[in-house]
Amino acid sequence: MHEKTKVLVAMSGGVDSSVAAALLLEQGFEVIGLTIATHKLDDDCRPVENKKSCCSYTGSLDAYRVCQILGIEHKIIDLTETFKNTVIDNFIAEYLHGRTPNPCVECNIKIKWGPFLTKANEYGADYLATGHYAKVLKNENNGRFYISKGIDKSKDQSYALWGLSQEQLAKTIFPLAEYTKQEVREIARKYDLPVFNKIESQDICFIPNNNYHSFIEKQVPDINQKVNNGNIIFRGKIIGKHKGFPFYTVGQRKGLGISFSEPLYVKKINAGNNIIEVDTFDETYNNGLIGEKLNLMKYNELDATKVFSVKIRYNDKGKSAYCRINSDGLLQVDFIEKRRSVAPGQSVVIYEGDDVVGGALIKEAL
């Protein structure tokens, strides 16, 4: 059916991307596996191992083995410099500006649908495929492509895909859209793929043990001299000193190092003045948010009178809100019920049912 259609599959060596390649082969596509080589060397030039990472050194070897079993070509693209200059540098810069980034969103836009699509064109591939649990659909009323949730809601990855352009979506296939994680593992077992029971990737790929504090300290050696010993302020009153504002996140309770009559939470990070603002639980609620770098998918514009479901962090279930473009040309989201701890730097994603209407980066809480 698809004898002349070539697909480039982004293969991490995990079970999801491996099965994505297998399913495409089963459907008659011509498949090429492509794996990213990024930054994976330590100070002694040894591969950095993180078994929970989506792109470890052993992941590249696993991807190669899977391609051999499936009988498809496997290629590796060296994106070490690009990954450093985009994803990693952005990650550090965001924390140094008092924001809480989501590097997976940045990676999807700048890496997986950047150089990967360029390589797809170089190899004469018609499409790019990944192992994401999501769908690409088309709005027949206006011709726009958009992301929708996959059938396995517990593995839904639509939140991290809001930044993809129409051109990128038009060339994207998600073979796992109609499968559950358990079904994917069974398919891998059927094909005798050695990754059928491989542990899921969970951590940020370039931060072993998920310790971003030590990572930032290593990347910015003089950071402690620059940002620690600033004031922790409660309703205008100094109540303590912090250990460096990049090491705190909005909504954080533990590890504040202060004593108070009731629990306090980080309410705001003021990087410019080296200040952490804290308050009680009830005072950490927000009425809405302002978003920047808005990317609309399903529609050309937002209906300000419509109630959408809005997610403000990856594991958020989503709650009702009104969404509009304000007088400054930025996305404004007004919550119907107040939401706790809106964190600048995170993504806000607008849903209509299972469909992604659009998304943006959170600029500030209201």
Image (cartoon, grey):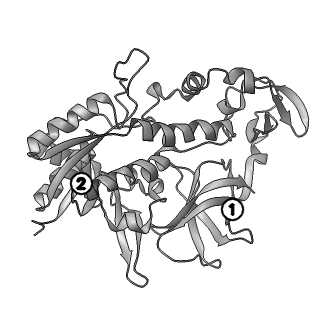
User: Which residue lies at the image location 74% right of the left edge and 27% below the top edge?
Assistant: 227
Say which residue label 2 marks: 8
Q: In the drawing, what numbered circle is on residue 224?
A: none
Residue 91's quadrant in the figure?
A: top right
* SS assignment at label 2: strand
Instruction: State the residue in front, 341 or 210.
Output: 210
Q: As drawn, is 324 to the left or to the right of 310?
A: right
Q: As drawn, is 120 to the left or to the right of 98?
A: left
**Residue most toward the right?**
237
Q: Which quadrant holds the C terminus?
A: bottom right
Amino acid at circle 1: Glu
User: Which residue lies at the image location 69% right of the left edge and 39% below the top edge?
Assistant: 98
Circle 1 packing at 10 Å, graded few (<14), some (14-19), many (20+), is few
Q: Position of residue 194 (x, y in %)?
A: 16, 35
Q: Position of residue 299 (x, y in %)?
A: 50, 76
Say which residue label 1 marks: 337
Circle 2 packing at 10 Å, graded few (<14), some (14-19), many (20+), is many
Q: Does 10 appear above or below 296?
A: above
Please report whichever mark, 1 or 2, sits nearer to the chain's N-terminal start: 2
**Residue most toward the top?**
44
Q: Nearer the viewer, mark 1 or mark 2?
A: 2
**Residue most toward the bottom?**
141
**Residue most toward the front?**
122
Instruction: State the residue in front, 26 or 167.
Output: 167
Q: Position of residue 355 (x, y in %)?
A: 44, 68
Amino acid at circle 2: Leu
* SS assignment at label 1: strand
Q: Position of residue 34 (x, y in %)?
A: 25, 45
User: Which residue lies at the image location 60% right of the left edge and 66% below the top edge?
Assistant: 320
User: Which residue lies at the image location 44% right of the left edge and 41% below the top edge?
Assistant: 82
Does residue 176 appear in the picture of this structure?
A: no
Cα separation between marks 1 and 2: 44 Å
